[in-house]
Amino acid sequence: MVRSDGRSGTTVTEGPFTEFSEWLAGFQVVDVADEARAVEIAARVSAVPGRGGVPCEQPVQVRRVVDGAIADAATMRDWLGTADGS
């Protein structure tokens, strides 16, 4: 969980995470080289100006989506076989 006011720093915690059904709206997927860059982007999103130009400090969840790219159909078939427990 990342929060930032855009001035004094960024706070990164290990959660707690809200249930997906409790999210207000949407999600963003970013392709980055490492977790540090994802946190940097999340901090900028968290510090977006709200009413009166005051940073919102909206909590932003950062989660890894994919560790490695699946390059072909055979690899995807193998991965899906392990994903369903077979």
Image (cartoon, rainbow, N blue to C red):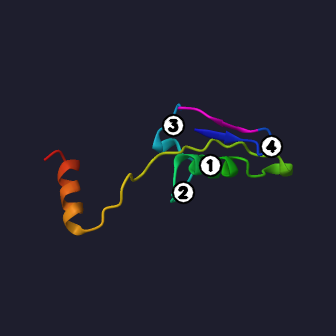
Percent coordinates x, y for residue 51 in the rendering:
82, 50
**What residue does disc 2 label?**
28
Q: Are marks 2 and 1 in contact (CB under 8 Å)?
A: no
Region of the chain picked out in magenta, as a range: 9-14
Q: Amino acid at mark 3?
A: Thr
Residue at the (67%, 43%) spot, across then down: 58
Query: Helix, strand, or loop for circle 1?
Result: helix
First in sequence, mark 1 or 4: give its number: 4
Residue 79 appears in which quarter of the rendering? bottom left
Query: Helix, strand, or loop for circle 2?
Result: loop
- 73 relative position to 52: left or right: left
Q: Residues within 10 Å of mark 3 (few under 14, many from 20)?
A: few
First in sequence, mark 4 or 3: give its number: 4
Q: Given the current orientation, which residue lies at the most extreme bottom position?
A: 72
Is residue 13 on the magenta stretch? yes
Q: Residues within 10 Å of mark 4 (few under 14, many from 20)?
A: few
Q: CA distance from mark 1 to mark 4?
A: 14 Å
Q: CA distance from mark 4 to mark 2?
A: 23 Å
Q: Nearer the viewer, residue 33 or 5?
A: 33
Q: CA distance from mark 2 to mark 1?
A: 10 Å
Point out which mark residue 18 bears.
3
Q: Amino acid at mark 2?
A: Gln
Is residue 64 on the magenta stretch? no
Q: CA distance from mark 3 to mark 1?
A: 16 Å
First in sequence, mark 2 or 3: give its number: 3
First in sequence, mark 4 or 2: give its number: 4
Q: Quadrant of the N terminus?
A: top right
Percent coordinates x, y for residue 80 in the rendering:
22, 55
Query: Helix, strand, or loop for circle 3?
Result: loop
